[in-house]
Image (cartoon, rainbow, N blue to C red):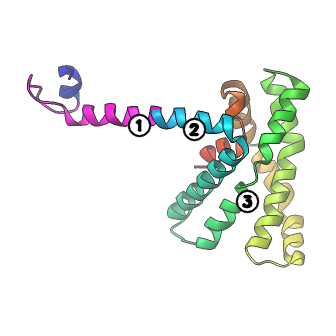
Amino acid sequence: MHGAACKLAGYRHHASQLCLKHFWFIAMRKEIVAFGKWYDQQIEVRPLATKALTSSVLAALSSVVAQVIRRKASIREVVSFTLQAAPPFSHFWFELLEAKLGPGKAALKTTVDQLLFRPIMIWYCFVFGGFLSGKRWTEVKDNLHRNFAKVVVSSWKVWPAAMWLTHRYIPAQYRQLDQVQELWKI
C-alpha cells in the first residue's frame, strides 16, 4: 500500500499493515469495472431490454430520493415513475437524430429535442402518470390544460443544458436519455 494514501486516510502506515480504506476502494473499483464491461456487453447484445431495465431502475431510484427529500412515501408513485420510464422511446429518438443530423451538432440536436420530442414526452408523462395514479380522462385533461405549458417552459430552464452535455460528451450507445435523464433527476 502507498504510505501517503494511508496517512491521508488517517492511518499510520506500517510496512506490514494494509490500509483498509485504500484496499476497499481498489476492490470496489475492480467490481465497478467488471460491471461496466458486463453492461457494455448487454447494451450491444440486448440494447432495448438493457435500456428499459436501466431506465426503470433509475426512475424508481429518483422517485425514492425525491420522496425521502419530501418526507412523503408512496409506493404508487415509485411504480408510476418506474413504468413511465420503462419504454425506451429515447433509444429510437436518438437514433433518428444521429441518422438525420449526423454526428456532433450538439446544439442543433438539443434544439430539435427540446422543441419537438420533449414536449411530446412531457405530454406522455402527464397522461400516463395521470392514469397510473387513478385519475379519469377529464381530470388528466384538466391537469394538462392547467399545467402542460408551465411544465414545458420550466423544463427549458434545466434540460437544454443537460441535453447539450449529453449530446456533446456521452457516447451514442449510452445516449438513450431515459437513463441519463434519471441520473440528472437524481
**Residue farthest toward the front in the current orientation of the protein:** 45
Q: Does dot 2 land on a helix, a strand or a loop?
A: helix
Three-letter amino acid code at the position of disc 1 = Glu
Is residue 132 visible in the rendered image? The answer is yes
Query: What numbered label is drawn on residue 86?
Result: none
Q: Is residue 172 left or right of residue 93?
A: left
Residue ID for mark 1: 31
In this picture, which residue range is highlighted in magenta? 9-33
Q: Residues within 10 Å of mark 3 (few under 14, many from 20)?
A: many
Q: Does dot 1 land on a helix, a strand or a loop?
A: helix
Q: Is residue 22 magenta?
A: yes
Along the viewing direction, whichever of 50 and 108 lies nearer the viewer = 50
Is residue 158 visible in the rendered image? The answer is no
Q: Does dot 3 land on a helix, a strand or a loop?
A: helix
Nearer-N-terminus badge (1/3): 1
Rendered residue at 12%/26% (across/down): 13
Q: Position of residue 11 (x, y in %)?
A: 15, 32
Residue ID for mark 2: 39
Q: Residues within 10 Å of mark 1 (few under 14, many from 20)?
A: few
Residue ID for mark 3: 84
